[in-house]
Image: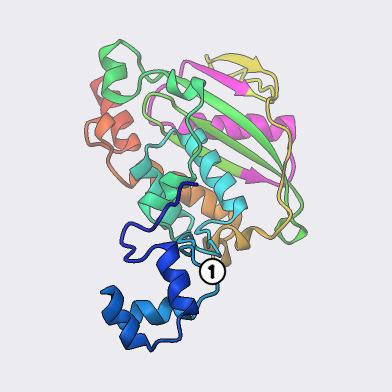
Amino acid sequence: MEIKLHANATTTPRIRRYLQQSAKSDRELAVELGISVTTVRRWRNREQVSDNHTTPKVIHKALRQEQVVLVNALRDATAAPLDELLLLVNDGLGIAVSRATLSRYLKPASAAQKGAALQGKKALKAGVMPQQLALHHLPLSLHMDDGGEQHLLWAREPVSGWCYARLYAGLSPQLLTRWTCELLEACPVDIQSIETFGFEVTLPERVVTVKVHPQKNSAVQVAVPLREIIPRLNVEAAGELLIQLCEFYNRGKTQKKLGESTPQAFLEALRRKD
């Protein structure tokens, strides 16, 4: 039978059994076997002769399961690289986590993410201009402390990553039209087309092409109060925090892929060139 010992072991199972069964003193056994008195005492106080397991008996997770789901959804929605995502999680959401821990909890990128369109300077060199927005609707079934049924509307410009999001208690065609118009006004570049996922919108006064895709996401169920998942919600309302999160990402940290510009500054520079 193969015996696996700890890399720094100074005794074998046979010696350990001998130590446990011997009537000699600790010092006598240490001199006889050429080991320390501490080693003798350690094995005389144990019943087994095998090494103890070195893995922790209790593993403390840095993130709860709901936070893991949220972090991965945020990465998928923004396509943010690890460093930018770390800022969003630490400073934006108030979830204290290290870079290494965050990386450990991220799921592998999907095939769609790996084959995503070019971004930033690389996109411009390939002739891809920021003229399109993707608009999404995500129904939320929240804890009653957070208002129950809510609706998340968010949009993203794929070349720069610029984002815009709002949270509503109810939806109507008029609200969707108003939100889309506010989005187009806020976007730093002139948008030629939009793609909607999960809803339809009409823009009679704007020359913008609209392509509608069916709803992909079912309602997200959240059984606990959001403040237990997102620490910042202990001092901020969810709707306000969502706006701040978008502003933080759009104007906060410069990104290498954008030529050391923020998404907001990247798009504003393109508009000035035009």
Residue 6 visible in the current orientation: yes
**Residue at 43% from the left image edge and 22% from the top image edge:** 114
**Which residue lies at the image location 28% right of the left edge and 17% below the top edge?**
124
**What kind of element bears circle 1?**
loop
User: Residue 116 colored magenta?
Assistant: no
Q: Is residue 122 left or right of residue 57?
A: left
The residue at which mark 1 appears reads as 48
Tell me, yes or no, if residue 247 can be seen here. Answer: no
Q: Which residue appears at 68% of the width and 25% of the height?
A: 216
Location of residue 95 in the rendering, given as x and y in whole percent from the top left corner: 48, 59
Q: In the image, residue 120 lies at what x, y percent? A: 31, 25
Which residue does the image show at 54% across and 54% down from the upper left? Answer: 240
Q: Quadrant of the C terminus?
A: top left
Range covered by the magenta-colored residues: 167-196
Render colour scheme: rainbow
Q: Position of residue 101 (x, y in %)?
A: 42, 52
Q: In the image, residue 231 lies at what x, y percent? A: 54, 63
Looking at the picture, tell me which residue is in the foreground, 192 or 223: 223
Q: Is residue 14 above or below residue 259?
A: below
Left or right relative to 35: residue 70 = right
Q: Nearer the viewer, residue 24 or 44?
A: 24
